[in-house]
Image (cartoon, rainbow, N blue to C red):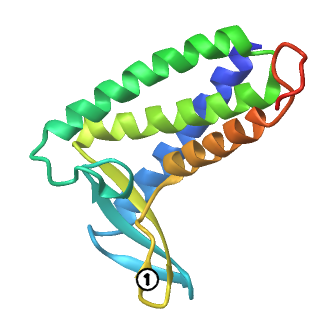
Amino acid sequence: MLNRWLGLSVLVIVLDQISKLWISSHFAYGEGLQVLSVFNLVLAHNTGAAFSFLNDAGGMQRWLFSIIAIVASAWIVMLLRRHSAQPLFALALSLILGGALGNLIDRIAYGYVVDFLSFHWDEHYFPAFNLADSAITCGAFLLILDSFKENKHGAAAS
């Protein structure tokens, strides 16, 4: 069962990298295209973390976030080995793993993460993100959902 979950993580990585390569080859940095009245494609580079946290930290953030992603990924693989028979929990971990590694590839290869999905309402813009970020967010939501289920030992969660 572990291979199924790792395969899902690989699929997330592949889709993430293909989408980033496509946007990078079709858009110049900062160039955008309005798709819907609330959604644009725009090529952005993020040297920080979520919401550009530590974006201007002078370069150390590249390695800090890379180390965090490597440690978190190793821990997630360990958890997947132990809990691969728990579908919702394993699905959540697989999405987070794929997303973390997709962004890690960018950090190592380019020194920044390629973002391109931009949602807005009027002049209020949500920070641009990518498929890896979406997978991490969905995985986190599924972890929260899983925490409301019966606990792993059969007793009802309170």
Residue depicted at 22% across the width and 53% down the height: 55
Amino acid at pointer 1: His
**Residue 126 x/y as whole percent:** 45, 71
Label 1 crowding class (10 Å Cα cut-off): few <14, some 14-19, many 20+?
Answer: few
Residue depicted at 39% across the width and 71% down the height: 42
**Residue 127 x/y as whole percent:** 40, 66
Judge from the rendering whether residue 155 lies leftward or rightward of residue 142; answer left or right. Answer: right
In the displayed orientation, state which residue is furthest to the left: 58
Q: Is residue 116 above or below residue 132?
A: below
Q: Is residue 42 above or below residue 37?
A: above
**Residue 102 x/y as whole percent:** 45, 38
Q: Nearer the viewer, residue 32 or 65?
A: 65
Residue depicted at 22% across the width and 42% down the height: 111
Report the quarter where the N terminus lies.
top right
Judge from the rendering whether residue 54 lies leftward or rightward of residue 34; answer left or right. Answer: left
Q: Nearer the viewer, residue 63 or 51?
A: 51
Q: Which residue is mark 1?
A: 124
Q: Secondary structure at mark 1?
A: strand
Q: Is residue 71 above or below residue 102?
A: above
Judge from the rendering whether residue 107 lies leftward or rightward of residue 124; answer left or right. Answer: left
Residue depicted at 64% across the width and 40% down the height: 139
Number of numbered markers = 1
**Residue 84 x/y as whole percent:** 74, 15
Report the quarter where the C terminus lies.
top right
In the displayed orientation, state which residue is furthest to the front: 158
